Amino acid sequence: MISLPKIFPLGLVATAACIPLISGPANAEETSPAPYVDSKAIKERFDQITPEDMELLRSKKILFASRSFGLNLLKGLNALAKKDGKYDLVSSYERYNVFKEGGNLGIMPADAFEKSNFVHFLATYHPHTKRLEEMNTLLGEGPHGFGKSADIVVVFYHTATPALFETYKNTLERWQAEYPDVTFIAVTSGFMGPKFTEENEASQAFGELVRDQLKGKVPVYDMGAILSDDFRVGHQFCPEYSADPAEVHPNLPAGEEMMAKGFLLILKEALTPQTAQH
């Protein structure tokens, strides 16, 4: 089991309270507020993404961990690119199913970023700390050492509990201290349909901790707010975002494209913090 030591406060540490929380690479403007993306931000600012912004995003190395909600995001990214090639982010993309292989990270080649710019792995589902451990290994241990090559790191949770938050926050903060040239995006967990009341309320509690302690300090992709249209339908995904009879996945184009738009927007604003709005 990989140890995830506790360090100072954060889709980012604690050894010393004297170490300041930073929201992105060391060369970012320290005075720039960290961007935050919810449903309102997408509606107001997504259209501000320029072809030049997308060229910048395509030039970056993205390391992404998720379960099935990441696949919904990918479908949304593909749909956006089909509608307008400007939004293509997946022309250099590769996915590895670590969960299917029993947590074997060896299925991911050490030179993955020499072959693809967007590297996505389907993480081990339970316990929820496991995907942090897997990401920790990929960032810092051989043969991968992706902390030296990745520009952006994102860890998705379709559902989470408030008990996860301290480990999540401290792990992200430690990573940011150890890999100052990497931009770490904090993410609230998502929502499912109305029959998952207990899980959705736990996700909301986790999300509230992210908003309360990390918003404005680090880049935050608010998946819960995006899927609920800023809580217009309460703590569940919008009914027009899903046709899943199991009520698990936001699998309709409206939901998948909102997830994708928010993803592009948070990446753009995290990498160009001087343009971020709140």
Image (tube, helix red, strand yellow):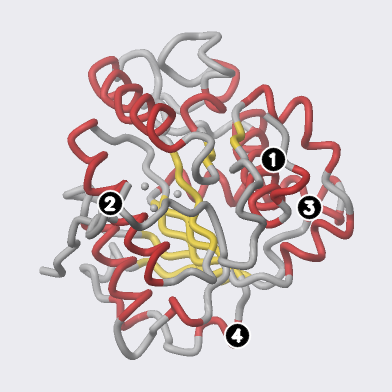
Residue type pointed to by label 3: Ala
Location of the C terminus (image quadrant):
top right
C-alpha separation, residue under disc 1 versus residue under disc 3: 11 Å
- Mark 2 sits on what residue? 17
C-alpha separation, residue under disc 3 versus residue under disc 2: 43 Å
Residue beneath the point at 21% across and 52% down: 129
Q: Is residue 213 left or right of residue 127?
A: right
Q: Which residue lies furthest to the front in this view?
A: 18
Residue beneath the point at 29% across and 55% down: 13
Q: Earlier in the sequence, mark 3 or mark 4?
A: 3
Q: Earlier in the sequence, mark 1 or mark 3?
A: 3
C-alpha separation, residue under disc 2 versus residue under disc 1: 35 Å
Provide residue 138's location: percent of width, then percent of height.
35, 75
- Mark 1 sits on what residue? 261
- Mark 3 sits on what residue? 81
Camera-nearest residue between 228 and 168: 168
Residue type pointed to by label 1: Lys
Q: Which of marks 3 and 2 is nearer the N terminus?
A: 2
Which quadrant of the view contains residue 178?
Answer: bottom left
Q: How many labels does the image show?
A: 4
Q: Nearer the viewer, mark 2 or mark 4?
A: 2
C-alpha separation, residue under disc 3 versus residue under disc 4: 21 Å
SS for tag 4? Answer: helix
